[in-house]
Amino acid sequence: MTGLCASQQLALRRQLERGLPLTTRPYRHIAEQLGASEQAVLDQVNQWNTEGLFRRFGLVVHHRALGFRANAMLVLDIPDQAVDAIGEQLSSAPGINLCYQRPRRLPHWPFNLFCMVHGRERAAVQAHIERLLERYELDHLPHRLLFSTRAFKQRGGRFTPAAEVAHG
Amino acid sequence: MQLNDLSQRLIERYQHQLPLCAEPWQAMAEELGCSEAEVLDCLRRLDDGGVLSRVGPVFEHSRAGASTLVALAVPPERLEQVAELVNRYPEVNHNYLREHDYNLWFVLTGPDRQALERCLEDIQHSTGLAPLDLPMRRAYRIDLGFPLEDAP
């Protein structure tokens, strides 16, 4: 238990989804808006962190602004009985930033394994992925490389429902 | 944007775990051997330069609510209109154009799966296009931040 009531917890989550204010004592700044104490806000954040609500907590960067403009989504159609083993294998391969299993949607979409590869140059990313597919003997399986050519929107997820304004 | 030495060190060191304390910038400054003002100034410049999305948590989707990856096959001449329409949904983030017949790819997040299904129905209705709904079944590697080095 922490000192925040339910509506304050919701408001804190919405604020965290937008990021900490870049001011000294950011939690005090948030606490003032919630009408809570800085310590209560910190206790709540630490509790959520311990409970595993966050995958990570830190700087979230736009990779495109850093020059990583060649971003490819590699999708593969892997037989169901092999997908876990190959997913584990690819997830530790160099250059793979994300690796997820997702459902096929036949007949439109036959692919069930998704990997993200970010790089500076398209040709290098393509060559890198071709080498990986060869090394893991996946090049004979159906796959596609979907480069992203434009970002229409890039921001973190908003999970917390927009509710009433917190008290205070 | 060109990164100076402090920006590089901040990005390399603090994507995964910021010190969770009342004065995080001060704690980072002590670890990096600079002042709190320098850390804050650097973060603000990264923010202004469009490098920084935010400083804070990346939520564990399965604990924070529901999410799914969605694709639409948009006729090229309708792309701008549909992308703008999709962007207007608060549930939508990371909306990208990709090279495939399914060319518009975005992530939906919301408090629960029901909210996502309502949103998917609404998108289908407003665009006249049938979305591919591709929720994650299993994560083999999740987002742990972004390495500056070691990328192709």
Image (cartoon, coloured by chain):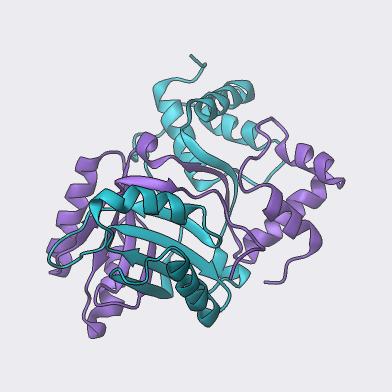
Chain colours: A cyan, B purple
Q: Nearer the viewer, residue A160 or A56?
A: A56
Residue sticking out furthest to the top: A1
Who's the residue at 33% across and 62% down the image? B106
Percent of width and height locating residue B99: 34, 78
Query: At x 20% / y 65%, what residue is drawn?
Result: A109
| Residue with the most extreme bottom position | B77
Does residue A166 show up? Answer: no
Choose between A149 and A103: the one closer to the eye.
Answer: A103
Q: How many marks?
A: 0
From what the image shows, is residue A74 above or below residue A48?
Answer: below
The answer to whether B144 is drawn above or below residue A95 in the figure is: above
Closest to the observer: A94 or B95? Answer: A94
- Tell whether A50 sits left or right of B17: left
B15 to the left or right of A51: right
Image-quadrant location for residue B36: top right
Q: Using the rendered view, name the quadrant where residue B122 is placed.
A: bottom left
A25 vs B145, left or right, is right
Q: Is residue A83 visible?
A: yes
Q: Is residue B140 left or right of residue A37?
A: left
Q: Give residue A107's position: percent from left, percent from top.
A: 12, 66
| Residue A159, horizontal then vertical, whole percent | 37, 42
Residue A49 coordinates in the image, percent (x, y):
53, 30
What residue is shown at x 45% (from left), y 41% (from top)? B59
Give above or below for A168 relative to A26: above
Residue at x-position 58% and y-position 21%: A40
